[in-house]
Image: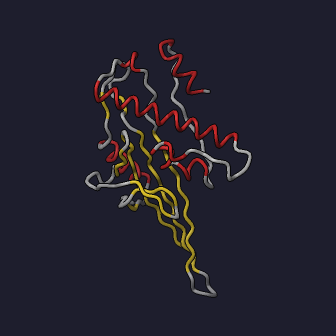
Amino acid sequence: MACSRSVSYIWRYIVRVRDLLNPKSSSSLHHQKLGPYVENLAKLAVTSFVNINGLMDEGNKARTVAATNMNETSSRSHAVFTIILTQRKKDSLTGLVAEKFSKISLVDLAGSERAKDTEAEGKRLQEGININKSLKTLLIVIHALASAKKKGDFVPYRDSVLTWLLKENLGGNFRTAMIAAISPAQINNEETLSTVR
C-alpha cells in the first residue's frame, strides 16, 4: 500500500476564483461529473507539516487584505486550503490498483461587515457587500441541509460561488467542524451573536 499527500489553495474574491499556489493561472469554475472544481488547479506534493505550512504561508501572501475602520488587515476574500490524501492498494490476485481519496479542507471565511462600522467606500464597500452576500448564502445552505427531510431535497449551492465550491464539504460524504472567532467586546456584540446562532 502506498500513500501520497498533496495540497491546493484557492481564493474566492468577489465573483472570481483564483489559485493561490499558482497566481498566474487563469482558473475558472467548472462542473463535471465529480462536482465543482477549479480548472488547472495546482496540487503540490507535500511530505511534512513544514511543507504544508510553507505552502499555506506562500498562498496567504497572494491573498487580498486591506485596512478598514474595524480591522487594519481585513481579509477581503474567502479561501480554501485543501490537503488531499491518496491511498493506492494493489490487488494481489488481479494486479489492479485501487485508489482511495480523502480530503481535509480548511476554510477561512472573511468576516461579515457592516458598512456603517467599517465606513468602507468604493471598492472596499463592494468587497464587503460580496462577503456578506456569500456568508448569507452559506447560512441558507446550512439551514437547508439541517432541515432536509430526505437526501434529494433541494439545497441552493449554486446561489454563491463559495457554496458551490464547498458543495462536497457541506453536503457530501464529509464531516464538518466549525471554529468561530468571537469577541467579548460590546462593540462586537451583534457580530458575535450572529456568529454563534
- On the image, which quarter does residue 12 sit in? top left
Residue 88: x percent and y percent?
54, 72
Q: Quadrant of the C terminus?
A: top right
Colour setting: secondary structure
Q: Is residue 176 left or right of residue 163?
A: right
- Disc count in the image? 0
- Eyeballing the image, is 71 above or below 34? above
- On the image, which quarter does residue 125 sit in? top left
Q: Nearer the viewer, residue 91 or 71?
A: 71
Residue sitting at 58 percent across and 47 percent down? 170
Residue sitting at 36 percent across and 51 percent down? 55
Residue 40: x percent and y percent?
35, 61
- Eyeballing the image, is 110 above or below 58? above
Residue sitting at 39 percent across and 29 percent down? 128
- On the image, which quarter does residue 67 sit in? top left
Q: Residue furthest top?
A: 186
- Eyeballing the image, is 59 above or below 135? below
Residue 73: x percent and y percent?
33, 28
Q: Is residue 4 left or right of residue 42?
A: right
Q: Quadrant of the N terminus?
A: bottom right
Q: Residue furthest left?
A: 24
Q: Nearer the viewer, residue 192 or 118?
A: 118
Q: Nearer the viewer, residue 40 or 105?
A: 40
Residue 168: x percent and y percent?
56, 53
Residue sitting at 53 percent across and 16 percent down? 189
